[in-house]
Image (cartoon, grey):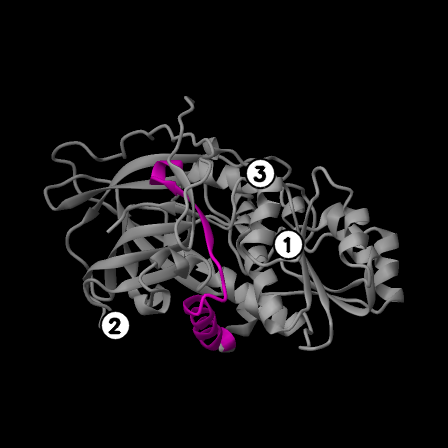
């Protein structure tokens, strides 16, 4: 597959242009079966499940005068449970949608798609968790998305509504069951619709509720929080929120000097450690001389083992993600070395798996709080954007290698 330079930018508030990671566009897939002139139109119904609820969308593989041409991305191959995902694991295809809708359906035009570390498990035949089902080879991938309603036969939605779904098909346009959509208020993000996939979306909620529900942060208690994966979508927000909630010291761990500079000079972290060049244990002793009260863990592995070794008695690990282990065939959360387990027990350190979906009753309140902090300038935003649906595989590959600063997004269309 030929390599090409993709149009990738990193955005913050106000917008700033930074380095552009390489992107490799997909090879186009073969023409859909039954797409020749005069062929009869056929509709395929595909159901994806999340948390027990079905997400239904429709796509058509036959051309006709009543069809709209679209592009879609399907899973081309699996990387294997221990393999590193690459852009070639995905394939761009041409397809079509009908002009007419059935009752309850909504036609949406995709604006932004989210790529996230958790998607790595969906590339396996078995995700290893009960709340996510795997993507199927040669079927359209799904994930978080935001778009605009173009047509609707659902009573809750009308043309020009801004909507989102956790199971948005990777397509330029799609017909979806209105039951899987949620209407959004653009005023919550001052018109920056991409923020609904980041700061005022699942990453923001994960960071806010993780800190509040598992961090045990107490204003005035002179607490220190360490955040790993600190330059990612959740980590960057978690550190800022920890400060707003009352932590007196916040230290981030990330993988480049550039990211360290962003965390300290833009996001308000007290210090940042580049784990690829610094001695993490020594730096933590320097930056956290009194020990660590709370640890927002996004990465797992050796970094987390070092942090836990410097945590105080009765401290808390917020187990958000384990990205360093996602390309390895093991249970989640991954097992810890005996010495680390002993440290947890001896110091009475809590380390509980955190699932933002378990706190759905607090989502509405959380989104209002995040929006308020955003408008007040108390939360800063960084986004790494790649333009073009054809580059979504390269964006995911880059994400899994740490190529993003802040939320990784794909711009499918701009309106």
Pick out the residue farthest to the front: 265
Question: What residue does disc 3 label?
Answer: 401
Above or below: residue 95 compared with residue 47: above
Q: Is residue 309 left or right of residue 264?
A: right
Say which label, 3 or 1, has the lower sequence index: 1
Q: Which residue is mark 1?
A: 298
Q: Which mark is residue 228?
A: none
Q: In the shown orientation, is residue 414 left or right of residue 68? A: right
Residue occupying the point 41% across, 21% down: 2
User: Disc 2 or 1, which lies upstream in sequence?
Assistant: 2
Query: Label 1 near label 2: C-beta < 8 Å?
Result: no
* Whether residue 224 can be seen here: yes
Does the segment drawn in magenta span residue 214?
no
Q: Which residue is mark 2?
A: 156
- How would you rate the neighbour count of disc 3 (Cα within 10 Å): few for under 14, some for 14-19, many for 20 or more? some
Q: Report the front residue among 346 and 128.
A: 346
Query: Marks 2 and 1, how far apart in space?
Result: 37 Å
Left or right of 350? Residue 189 is: left
Q: Secondary structure at mark 1?
A: loop
Q: Residue at x 35, y 51 (%)?
A: 112
For mark 2, give the secondary structure.
loop
Marks 3/2: CA distance?
40 Å
Note whether residue 210 is visible: no
């Amino acid at each position: 597959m030929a390599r090409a330079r993709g149009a990738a930018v990193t955005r913050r508030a106000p917008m700033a242009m930074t380095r552009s990671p390489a992107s490799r566009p997909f090879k186009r897939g073969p023409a859909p079966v039954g797409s020749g002139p005069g062929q009869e139109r056929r509709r395929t119904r595909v159901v994806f499940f999340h948390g027990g609820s079905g997400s239904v969308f429709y796509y058509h593989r036959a051309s006709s005068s009543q069809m709209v041409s679209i592009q879609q991305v399907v899973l081309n191959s699996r990387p294997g449970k221990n393999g590193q995902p690459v852009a070639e694991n995905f394939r761009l295809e041409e397809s079509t949608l009908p002009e007419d809708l059935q009752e309850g359906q909504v036609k949406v035009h995709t604006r932004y798609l989210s790529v996230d570390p958790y998607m790595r498990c969906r590339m396996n035949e078995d995700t290893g968790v009960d709340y996510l089902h795997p993507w199927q080879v040669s079927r359209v991938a799904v994930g978080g998305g935001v778009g605009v309603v173009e047509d609707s036969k659902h009573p809750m939605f009308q043309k020009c509504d801004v909507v989102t779904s956790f199971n948005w098909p990777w397509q330029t346009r799609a017909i979806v069951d209105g039951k899987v959509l949620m209407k959004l208020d653009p005023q919550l993000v001052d018109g920056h619709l991409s923020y609904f996939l980041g700061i005022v979306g699942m990453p923001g909620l994960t960071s806010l509720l993780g800190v509040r529900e598992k961090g045990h942060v107490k204003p005035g208690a002179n607490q220190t929080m360490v955040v790993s994966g600190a330059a990612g979508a959740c980590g960057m927000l978690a550190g800022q929120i920890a400060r707003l909630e009352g932590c007196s010291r916040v230290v981030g761990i990330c993988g480049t000097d550039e990211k360290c500079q962003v965390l300290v000079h833009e996001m308000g972290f007290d210090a940042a450690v580049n784990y690829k060049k610094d001695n993490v244990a020594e730096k933590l002793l320097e930056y956290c001389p009194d020990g660590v009260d709370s640890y927002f863990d996004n990465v797992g592995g050796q970094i987390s083992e070092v942090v836990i070794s410097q945590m105080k008695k009765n401290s808390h690990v917020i187990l958000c993600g384990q990205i360093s282990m996602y390309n390895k065939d093991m249970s989640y959360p991954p097992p810890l070395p005996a010495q680390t387990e002993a440290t947890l027990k001896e110091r009475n350190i809590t380390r509980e798996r955190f699932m933002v979906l378990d706190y759905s009753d607090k989502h509405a309140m959380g989104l209002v709080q995040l929006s308020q902090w955003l408008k007040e300038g108390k939360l800063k935003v960084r986004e790494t954007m790649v333009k073009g649906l054809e580059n979504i595989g390269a964006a995911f590959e880059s994400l899994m290698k740490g190529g993003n600063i802040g939320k990784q997004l794909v711009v499918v269309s701009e309106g």
